Amino acid sequence: MIAYIVRRCLYAIPILIGVNVIVFLLFFFVNSPDDMARTHLGQKRVTPEQIDQWKREHSLDLPYFYNAGWRRIGAIVATKAENTAEFLTAGEGNYALTIETPPGPKTVPPRVGQARTVRIESSQPERLILPAEFAAQGNLNLPATATTQRFAFRIAPAQTAGQTPPTIRLTLTVEAPAPTQRAVLAYQAPIALLSRFTDTVFFQRSLRMLFFQYGKSDDGKIISEEIFHRIVPSLTITLPAFLLALLIDVFFAMIVAVYRGTYVDYWSIILCVLLMSISGLFYIIGGQAIFAKTLRLVPISGFDYGSHALKFALLPVLISIVSGLGGSVRFYRTIFLEEISKDYVRTARAKGLPERRVLFVHALKNAMIPILTSVVVSLPFLFAGSLLLESFFAIPGMGSYMIDAIQRQDFAVVQAMVSLGSFLYVVGLLMTDISYTLVDPRVRLE
Amino acid sequence: MGSLLQSLWLALGFQPVILWSDILIYLLLGCGGTWLVFALRREDWQVALRQVTANRVAMISFCILGCYAAIGFLDTLHFRVVSASTPNGEGIQSVLDRLSAPLVERTEKTYSAPFATHLFAKETMQTPDGRQIRDFPRLQHAGTHLLNPDDKWSDIGKRLLIGLGWGLGIGAGLLLVIVWLGHRLWFGVFLLVATLVVTETVVLGQSYHIFGTDKTGQDVLYLTLKSVRTGLIIGTLTTLIVTPFAILCGILAGYVGGWIDDVIQYVYSTLDSIPEILLIAAAMLIFQVGLREEETIISADKRLIYLCVIMGITSWTGLCRLIRAEVLKLREIEYVQAADAFGVSRGRIMLQHLVPNVMHIVLISTVLRFSGLVLAEAVLAYVGIGVDPSMQSWGNMINQARLELARDPVVWWNLFAAFVFMLGLVLPANLFGDAVRDALDPRLRTR
């Protein structure tokens, strides 16, 4: 049994990683981090510097999957007034010069035929090793296209230790007629093996969620703390709703099953289908209008902790039960009917047991097995709260957190909720499998 | 060629426009029709059809669904009005817009209750003697023929009678024809009731707003009629857009097995683990960033298809799983074994023996998922990730009405119209779906 559970947990890992990858692709590949920054900062009047800053704050300036240790030293956007910049570098090592179109709405691609050159100068020219594209004196003619280009070069170690300073001053000059592109200078710093994989967007923004490290939301709050605070209000609604609904649904399903084949059965099923056919929104709106607004029995919305929670939770719980009634009663009824047609029921009847005892003792006990195992999967989701109810009743739980995040377009929170939701689902499946073995000794787990 | 077409449109006075969703609908109708022709040659499908047609509740439901489908189809035939002054055409319209022109043109200033003669909001008006008063103004397009608004109810009664007369006249005629042709009586009665509804709507709708008007003064009846197409598209296209993919994967996983089975199972259990609404939310948020500005109706149409695809991706897994299980059973059955023994290729076995024998699962899951999807649209619209806000849908209607619930007296008619029309679609869909399932595969029990 324990070996089985361990194995099932291991099976869950690739699934969770798969979800993680899908969500990562969805969030960071369909939209580039630049797009996301622009969405958040507003589409218009956003400077490349603001975008870079936003990306740094949200650790989106890192490489996606593998960090070779490249660090940005600085950038220069050529203007008429200023087209040269000096950078103090660490000296020996690998460097890269990237010519790119800076992110931002108002960049103009270079016109065809414009002469554009980039020049790199060093305070110790003998140590600067430039690739073949560079002509003498470190001049580089750029082709007149807008595509990003990257040039790697090296700075050799100092020849004689102690005489020359190991650091080197690089001067970058961009001669382009229009401020269209920028030159970014980067240095490859030594980086620990582990950090090569952890200092990436994929790890920082996605894989960490497997360990419940959700980071911060866009308004700067720590997501896991927020979730922690919101579980209690959610459970206040979902837990009583779940338990009461189970009792009531089974009770009604039992009664309908007792009257199987009669008009009571027929019209109950029609009624169930009718209840199923009404959108959950109408139950909520209708319930609020009747019980809170017209009859004024309970407050329209709001939440309080402790014993005051009762009056706020009453209506949401009631609505939750009623809206799920139709589907569940119909589903449990078929389970009961299946059970009633089995041999042991016939045997019990043949023994002369009263019909009531056969149904409510023998059949009920056995029918509870598929019913319980079918609801176990939804147990973890009690923590996730109810999306619509919490939003309509202004309950500060997980459901309303999610709706708010979606409406504020807070990618970090939505991503965290997806991750958490899939975790809960996997846990639910695991619990279902285990509950099968617990209630039914015939099920053997291999 | 282009100019020839242009002059043809000019002569006709309209130019047909086919949106992406229209193409999908035509494709769907075409495929569905072709498949039906092939399916009904088979014994087992004929038996199932007889069982469904013998079920009166299911057949009445089917007829109601047919009415909805007819409305949706009329709304699918899009065109632009072309005239000499506007050779490029005006805004895109549908045949339904044209048919309900009396409703479209009669917009008020803002809310008005069903059958009201006065606006719902007070306005400052000048009386003939020059004084300023604040009162509810008369509606511009409803009950204008009444000299005294107090006569409204007797007028409505009169019109109801006229509608009843017309309806009974035409409906009874149809009923007689149906009975004379030897069809079932219930079908005639259904036609009679349907005719009555139509005639009453036409008679009353011409001089009143039956379901009131919304915030911008549009007739709610028109809005809810337009929502039918959105609901139907979401209910059907969502399942069917991904069906070929689900069939392919299900059959490959079940029949070929091996590592292909492992991969497919891994993919669908992974997709399955993502809570549906969260995946849809994430995907819609992402696509929102990338949508370009176009004519509203076209971009709204694209968003609708996006939504269908995304919802389809979440619903694809269940279908794939069912098909895989069925194929696992089928591959052990004699005729597949025999085909294999005769040296029929695997591809041919899949195409000829397996595909036709899993089609009933596709049909069942389509009809059973339909109502859930129509209901889900409303929830998504509430969350703000549903169809485009400019597109008429029941979800958007409910969402807009919800904001006005705090008003006193309550603006209830938007909600009421959406409720009636949604229930009118979902209830028959549920009843019909159950009948189809019972006829094709009673063991397939779903919640």
Image: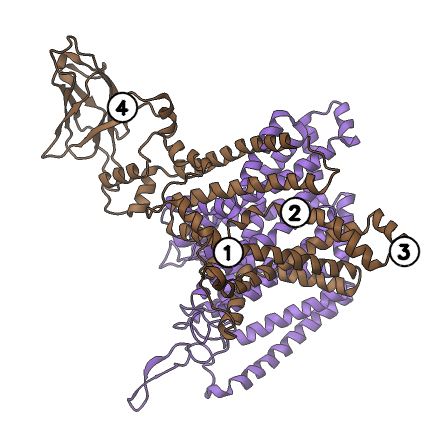
Chain colours: A brown, B purple
Question: Residue A415, position in %: x, y?
Answer: 43, 42
Q: Residues within 10 Å of mark 1 (few under 14, many from 20)?
A: many
Name the residue carrying label 3. Answer: A352
Q: Considering depth in this image, is B187 or B274 the residue closer to the camera?
A: B274
Q: Chain of mark 4?
A: A
The amino acid pointed to by label 4 is Arg
Q: Marks 3/2: CA distance?
A: 32 Å
Q: Secondary structure at mark 2?
A: helix
Q: Toward the viewer: A399 or B330? A: A399
Q: Is residue B420 left or right of residue A413?
A: right
Camera sees residue B353: no
Measured Cα–Cα span from mark 1 to mark 3 = 52 Å
Q: Are marks 1 and 4 in contact (CB under 8 Å)?
A: no
Residue B285, horizontal then vertical, whole percent = 41, 46
Q: Which mark is residue B379?
A: 1
For marks 1 and 4, give the CA distance: 48 Å
- Between circles 4 and 2, the one closer to the viewer is 2
Q: Nearer the viewer, residue B410 or B301?
A: B410
Choose mark 3 or mark 2, whichever is in front.
3
Callout 1 and callout 3 share a chain: no
Q: State whether residue A414 is above or below residue B383.
A: above
Earlier residue among tags 3 and 4 = 4
For the residues labelled 4 and 2, the Cα–Cα distance comes to: 57 Å
Q: Amino acid at mark 3?
A: Gly
